[in-house]
Image (tube, rainbow, N blue to C red):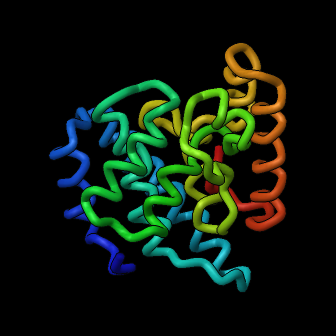
Amino acid sequence: MSEKLPTREQAILFLRENGCRKNVIEHCEAVTELAVEIAKICKKRGLNVNIELVEIGALLHDIGRGKTHSVHHAVIGAQMAKEIGLPDSIISIIKKHVGGGITAKEAKKLGWPKDSYTPQTIEEKIVAYADKLIEGSRRVPIERTIEKFSQELPSSTVERVRRLHKEMLELIGDCKCPP
């Protein structure tokens, strides 16, 4: 599988061709804008981050929403990306962006293939984090996402989001990009 990334235009076309509605594409674009801001801050701070991978991964992170709006959109999106022939690095971002990651035990409960669903690379973490700071196509404080997740999801998931937030703050410092 080639690691050549699609262009921004190709990524948006993939979203459209795979059934993503305008609001999903707008969400993906908003996540992309924030994720790229975060990636640039990380780069300025001397971290080795592939900004192009963050951009294209963020654009495509919700491709599975063309088929479902359930949590399964991550696994379905990863499968769709594989079928299109997208690079493993993009497939991995799509697969690992939900919540603060999905543990092997949770994945088994969901009936997902045995695999790792927690963000590991800096690019995966940036996209997963940016996604938690965008509601629809608007930026929201992490506290809002945590509050919402607290009402809907197990405390272990909420704790993973908190840890991701803490880790990202340590990487980006006191930047002004998230609200």
Judge whether residue 42 can be spotted in this image.
Answer: yes
> Does 11 sit left or right of 125 as displayed?
left
Q: In this view, does 37 lie above or below 34?
A: below
> Residue 155 location in percent, x, y?
83, 25
Q: Which residue is drawn at 64% across and 72% down?
A: 41
Residue 164, position in %: x, y?
A: 76, 50
Residue depicted at 55% across the width and 43% down the height:
113
Residue 79, given in percent of the width and then of the height, sits at: 37, 49
The tally of labels here is 0
Picture quadrant where residue 82 is located = bottom left
In the image, farthest residue toward the top: 151
Relative to 104, say whether 94 is above or below: below
**Left or right of residue 135: residue 23:** left
Q: Nearer the viewer, residue 75 or 112?
A: 112
**Observer-nearest residue: 87 or 24?**
87
**Image-quadrant location for residue 39:** bottom right
Q: In this view, does 172 lie to the left or right of 23?
A: right
* 92 lies above or below 108: below
Image quadrant occupied by the C terminus: top right
Regarding residue 129, the answer to whether it shows in the image is no
Q: Give me the residue at 44% from left, 59% from top.
A: 91
The quarter of the picture where residue 100 lies is top right
Name the residue located 25 percent from the left edge and 37 percent from the top edge. Answer: 20
Q: Left of 179 or right of it: where is 84?
A: left
Q: Where is residue 1 in the image (x, y as percent from the top left)?
A: 35, 76
